[in-house]
Amino acid sequence: MLSSLVAGYGHAFPSRIVTNDDLSKTLDTSDSWVTSRTGIVTRRIAAKEDSTASLGARAAENAMAAGQCAANDIDAIILATTTPDHPMPSTAAKIQSMIGARKAFAFDVQAVCSGFIYALSIADHFIKGGAVKNVLVIGAEVMSKVLDWTDRSTCVLFGDGAGALLLQAKETSDRGEALPIARGVLSTHLFSDGNFYDMLYVDGQATSSNPCGVLKMNGRAVFAAAVEKMVESSELALAHNQLQLNDIDWFVAHQANKRIIDAVAERLGIPEEKVIITVDKYANTSAATIPSTLSIAASERRILPGHTLLLSAIGGGFTWGAAVLKW
Ligand code: UT7
């Protein structure tokens, strides 16, 4: 049987750091409000020369380097993004050109902040079906271009960045003998409910008269749904794999708000020391939060080979989901 193993990881952020104090110079907000309500202290904001494609390509190149995989050996590029460089063609195609992965097929996935879990699920199914061997699964966003910088209830929450995993098809049995422990993506679980469409959306349309809008959000409703749905999908993922909480080494949740992550971890019964937080430094980078957090924690040698990870996310739509991954 084929499994999707994590063979490499990478992340990339714009160099410009914007603090809460920086925002309070032009906005009626404060470091203490943002920190206490969200855990966010700083975020990275794209410069003119940064784009979703350039950040995604840098993260992908880092993942290929870590996995010692040449661009020519990449079979597929799946980019999760809600901020594509253009409405068409896909930003994944631009990344393909930037990294020189000539053999690959490439496409974008739009599931907002859950996009990476969706892209991971698609990649895993391609690999398990035997269609591809090396897949780049990327989450990349320039959220700063869809923010209303005069709306303090939304603009303080988001940032720009990218993360990528290189997934590689591996036989789980070696010369006919089953490996002792399953590795790679163990399962993915996806959900949507379009009845929540107007809880979190960008109000523009891809037309020449109204090319792009700004993000609108019912923060309290999103908060409540996030806790409920991330807990539900995480419990389902654990039960599906017959795992107990003790079997989980790390909980890597979508980094929207530290209070949401803390509440989910508490409801699940996951201790603080098993929860990875990057929202303090990078804020909510939508589809990029989970892959960049995985990459940062693996670079810091917190996530190690053999560790079992529970991933969970929720995003506009609503879309949500969970995954269990053996690193
Ligand atoms: O990927 C999913 C993305 N979405 C999210 O993660 C959002 C989830 N929701 C949240 O994180 C929280 O709902 C927020 C952080 C957005 C807001 O926190 P809250 O505790 O739910 O505050 P609130 O919306 O109830 O607002 C409380 C007060 C209001 O003032 P009044 O009406 O009580 O006078 C807001 O106007 O806080 C005010 N407020 C701010 N004050 C200072 C809202 N934003 C700010 C701000 N600075 N940036």
Image (tube, rainbow, N blue to C red):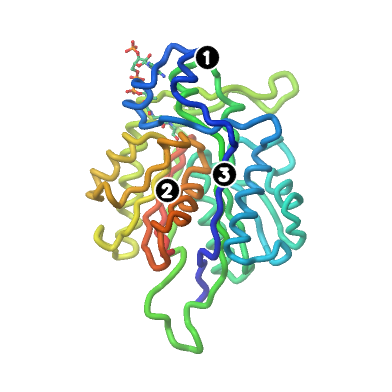
Q: Looking at the image, which is closer to me, 313 or 144?
A: 144
- Whether residue 165 sits left or right of residue 190 in the image: it is right
Q: Which mark is residue 39?
A: none
The Cα–Cα distance between marks 3 and 1, rounded to whole angstroms, is 25 Å
Identified at 71% across, 57% down, the residue is: 105
Ligand 1 shows up in which quadrant of the image? top left
Q: Quadrant of residue 303?
A: bottom left
Quadrant containing the C terminus is bottom left
Q: Quadrant of residue 186?
A: bottom left
- Whether residue 145 sits left or right of residue 277 in the image: it is right
Identified at 63% across, 67% down, the residue is: 132
The Cα–Cα distance between marks 2 and 3, rounded to whole angstroms, is 20 Å
Which residue position is annotated with label 3? 162
Which residue position is annotated with label 1? 150
Determine crowd level at label 2: few under 14, some 14-19, many 20+ residues with C-alpha closer than 10 A: many
Q: Earlier in the sequence, mark 3 or mark 1?
A: 1
